[in-house]
Amino acid sequence: MEDFLKQKFRPEFLNRLDEFIVFDSLTQDDIKLIVDKFMVEVTERVSDLKVSLFLSEEAKAWW
């Protein structure tokens, strides 16, 4: 990972970083869970406007 970063960034920038954290890619299930939580939040925000939201499973799986 460090070799890749050295190819992409100047040493002046890399010297300012204390450590590197590498994350695993999100799975399709992870993305659906995030979308579901976001939809709950948005639905709560617009509830006073008497707006209802629906997101199909196909739309959730788009990513």
Image (cartoon, helix red, strand yellow):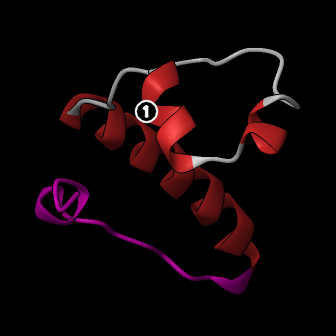
Q: Which quadrant does the N terminus fall into?
A: top left
In the image, residue 21 sits, relative to residue 9, either above or below, namely above
In the image, residue 3 sits, relative to residue 50, either above or below, namely above
What residue appears at the point 83 percent right and 17 percent down from the top-left corner?
A: 18
Task: Decide if residue 50 is on the left or right side of residue 15.
Answer: left
Query: What percent of the width, then of the height, locates residue 45?
Result: 73, 66
Where are the magenta residues, as a range? 49-63
**Secondary structure predominantly adopted by residues drawn in magenta:** loop
Query: What percent of the width, then of the height, locates residue 24?
Result: 37, 21
| Type of amino acid at the residue the image marks with label 1 | Phe
Q: Secondary structure at mark 1?
A: helix
What residue appears at the point 52 percent right and 21 percent down from the top-left corner?
A: 2
Which residue is at the front of the view, 20 or 50?
Answer: 20
Which residue is at the front of the view, 63 or 19?
Answer: 19
Asked whether 3 falls inside the magenta stretch, the response is no
- Residue neighbourhood size for the residue with mark 1, other residues' Cα within 10 Å, grouped as few (<14), some (14–19), many (≥20): few
Q: Which residue is mark 1?
A: 4
Quadrant of residue 48 in the image?
bottom right
What residue appears at the point 45 percent right and 41 percent down from the top-left corner?
A: 34
